Image: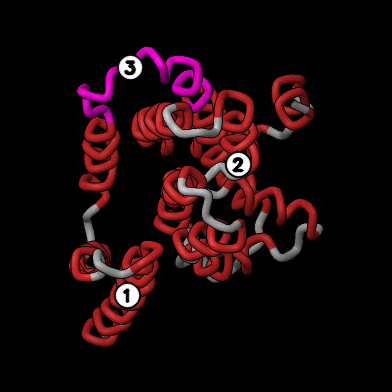
Amino acid sequence: MFLFHKFWSGAVSDRKRYYFSLGLKDTASPLIATGIWGFVTGIAMMKSSLGETFSGLMTLMVYAGSAQLTSLPLINSGSPLWLIFMAGMIVNIRFIIFSAALQPFFRHLAWYKRLVLGYVTTDMSFVLFMSRYGTDKRRGRPHHLWYFLGLILPNWVVWQVCSFLGIFAGRLVPESWGIEYAAILALLAVVVPLIKTRPFMVCLLVSGVVAWAGQPLPLRLGLGAAVVAGLVAGVVTEQLQRKSET
């Protein structure tokens, strides 16, 4: 709230406003998928054994749809707490890679500010940020932060609002509607237009194959392996492409 007060009161420079607005513009389309995914996650939590109060606390504190959905069957079956946390960490292991890639851009910030940025970082915000500034040689510039804030803050707000809508409307939505497929289609509609380069294409292809092959693995280990394999394949492809161009 303090940030928005500074922004709208004119305490923020025009240059920072520009990059914040640029982030808002870039993340506008993905917000549709974010909202649907948050709504579906809210419904799933409500249909589990959590109840409204703990579902609301979970969406506020965890803020990770894949980890939330992974933990629900374990919570419903009465699995031990360590197993629930481990499953969530495995599904979200990709954020370690995201954080390592973003660290050069934000390492000048205080640790608690970086902690907040880590909490609100999403897959799509990482992809959009690295697509625009990943090749910058000079990192840690002010406009990097303000552009990133323009990406992540709207996502957090939309996710929370739609998740709570799903929580309170969960009992009214029949399971026969198969609403989870709407979230998948929305995510595809956002991701497909981003496939513009060979490394991105190879990344998606490799991660898709590994995810399919890793379905029998427990605790959704196949998903974690797919993320790592896709990122490695994308990086290797990009390096080979640069060598061929020089």
- Identify whether 55 is placed above or below 202: above
Amino acid type at circle 2 is Leu
Q: Position of residue 69 (x, y in %)?
A: 43, 44
Residue denoted by label 3: 173
165 or 105: nearer the viewer? 165
Assign a secondary structure to mark 3.
loop
- Which numbered disc flags the more N-terminal residue, 2 or 3? 2
**Residue 85 inside the magenta-drawn segment:** no
Front in this rendered view, residue 135 or 199? 199
Who is closer to the viewer here, 72 or 229?
72
Marks 1, 2: nearer the viewer: 1
- For disc 2, the neighbor class at 10 Å (few under 14, some 14 to 19, many from 20) is many
Residue bounds of the magenta highlight:
163-179
Question: What x and y, as percent, mark residue 207?
Answer: 26, 66
- Which label sits in the foreground, 2 or 3? 3
- Closer to the chain start, of discs 1 and 3, is 3
Q: Secondary structure under badge 2?
A: helix
14 relative to 69 in the view: left or right: right
Indicate left or right for 176 with 107 as reference: left
The outermost residue toward the top is 172
Disc with the residue nearer the chain's start (1 vs 2) = 2
The residue identified by callout 2 is 149
Query: Label 1 to label 2, Cα distance in Å?
Result: 28 Å
Residue that mark 1 sits on: 229
Q: Looking at the image, which residue sits at the far front?
A: 78
Q: Is residue 173 magenta?
A: yes
Q: How many marks?
A: 3
Between circles 1 and 3, the one closer to the viewer is 3
